[in-house]
Image (cartoon, coloured by chain):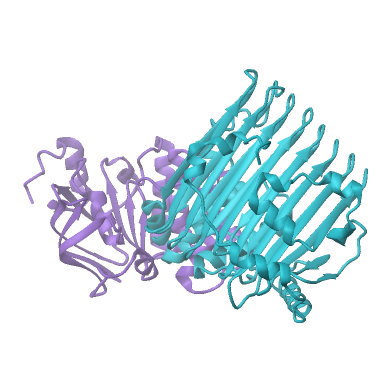
Amino acid sequence: MENYKLLPDEQSELYKRFYVKLPLEQFGEELLGGREDPKEAGSLLAMSKQMRDNLGIKFDLLFGSSTHVIENENGFVKVIDVGMLTEEDLARKMYRNKENRLVAFIHAHTKKLVLIDVPDGKTADISILFANSDRPFATQIIIRTGRESKLSLFEWFGSKTTRKSLNSALHEATIGRHSTAEINIVHNEDERTYVVGFSKARILERGYLKLNYVYNGGIGSRTKNEINAEEYQAKDEVIELVLGSSEQQFDINTIITNGERETVADLESKAALMDESMCLLKGFASLLDNAKGARSFVNERGILLDKDCHMDSLPGMSINNSDVKATHSSATAPVDEDALFYLMSRGADETAARRLVVAGFFASTISRIENEKMKEAVSALMHDKINNGCFGVIPKLDMHNIWYTPAQSPGMFQGHYKYRNE
Amino acid sequence: MTLEIRDVYATTGGKEILRGISLKIKRGEFHVIMGPNGSGKTTLAKAVMGHPSTKVTKGDILLDGKSILDLKADKRAKLGLFLQFQNPVEIEGVGFVNFVRAAKESLTDGTVEIKQFMGEIRDRSAKLNITQSVIGRSLNHGFSGGEKKKAEVLQLSLLKPKMAILDEPDSGLDIDAIRVVAKNINEIAEHDNMGLLVITHYSRILNYMKPQFVHIMSDGKIVAEGGKEMIEKVEKEGYDSLIGKK
């Protein structure tokens, strides 16, 4: 550990004070000594069928704690044992154990990992279901897109447990030169599952990464994402949508880095919280010495639907080049009583009115997502969450309930984004 | 349907605003409440519709003889009440058409056939001189003052309530728009045999309407009542001369 240089956000006293502690120790032994769950393949197939029936989503790969099922062999996805990693695969790995004990934890317990490789000039559309049963889950997903390739990736993390469990994953992505990737990740684990997630992404020259997260499930979630626009004119847009209910806790720490000239990094995080749920949004923009002409945005917003929910948003910035445009903003408020009254005066009951307000709150962000599966999944999850406060179950998509339309402008944050389209 | 406001006292933010107001409106009747700023007109509208910040401390509000004080706004709307807001709330991201359709479905407990509904929206929007781009936007978001008022009247025409309270339907409108809005309100109310209570400061919109009953409100009470002649009186003499002359 003595050689590890702390990232700027890790030096933040605030970030040290605000965090969600997860009881992971209890899972380690089980992961190491875990036996294969004979029922898991059946459970994965059942979940996949339900996803197809309810949301119209077909998966290429079903990946569980101890087994996997390939539904559609497309040539872009491989599942391999950790011991079979080649030198080239290992070279792509960005995480090192010494960085973080949770990373070391996932490294120590991963048995199989997923490799996604989109060769130069190719286009890939991939959907993967990750799910844990009572047996805890740890895996790694390594993504590489070649020059001028296109990737649309949809990942659904779910779980079906009868006792406390864990769903943990590392994502390591390299977005190639002139390539485009949209990675969509939905967390919808059940109320007995803890969620740990780490993502690192490098975007190479003129590469473009859209990274869309939805955090809806899990009783406690802790994630750290480091997205680095590493080469000239690389661009990333990160969206984080949090839907909290009951006693869910979310600790979401995302660092966007502009590492080179004329790079663009954009982080937009929104949370809608109900009941006694809690969320920490820790978005951090780091503009390095070489980031001349770079642009960076951090925007965190929250809406509190009940008096006992809680949110702390802690946007931060570290700017080391004077020729950049960078803004950060944050706003959290209870749901507007007048808005609810207006909607109710037109006949919407209180639940429907709240759902409308939340749908409106997320609409401008959802409209930036390109993957239709992701858009519909978010709408269905949001509907279920506001109506029933539930998570971890697969919602049924009802197009009738999609009431949102894209917002015309960033509204009160118009000033915040005045540089976005330059 | 009859809306009866019976000796109502009400507070907003702990301050007593309504002080013993009584009013009876039957379906098909057209009433107007006029009064100076701060007389409690909007508070009355909110009390009738059930705004949570307005507490009725004494008296009762009844629809067809049954108290509605314990009902939330959505239940009152389902009974046939409608409030056109003085300052409609902007709700970004919620499409106008989808919202009104959902509201209609909620009020009727049925399913709205979208093609026919869009036809209705187009017809009435044309009569109100509302451009289609306004209809395609989020609910009241980015609407001008005039567009907001017209959009409220459009909702009135689509939701077809039995009893409508229109809180300053003329404020923010230019002279041509006032005429258009008044004409549309007349048509809608007549077509659906609506009970109508229009709240306004100024008589201008009433030049294009035919109210049967005019009530002058001051300091939380009705202080003068009469027919359409009251409007001329207000125009000529102002409110001061009428206050205290019930």
Residue that appears at 24% across and 52% down: B43
Residue that appears at 58% across and 64% down: A218
Q: Residue furthest front?
A: A2
Do we see residue B212 in this rendering?
Answer: no
Find residue B44 and report its image quarter: bottom left
Side (left or right) of A17 relative to A420: left
Q: Is residue B159 above or below residue B182?
A: below
Q: Residue furthest top?
A: A322
Chain shown cyan: that is A
In terms of depth relative to the viewer, which is nearer, A336 or A251?
Answer: A251
- Measuring from the top left, give residue A73's x and y in whole percent: 91, 65
- Measuring from the top left, give residue A237's x and y in whole percent: 68, 41
Do we see residue B208 in this rendering?
Answer: yes
Residue that appears at 74% across and 51% down: A171
Q: Is residue A222 above or below residue A58?
A: above
Find residue A384 and report its image quarter: bottom right
Q: Colour of chain B?
A: purple
In terms of depth relative to the viewer, which is nearer, A294 or A412?
Answer: A294
Tell me the quadrant of the picture where the C terminus of chain A can be found.
top right
Find residue A61 and report its image quarter: bottom right
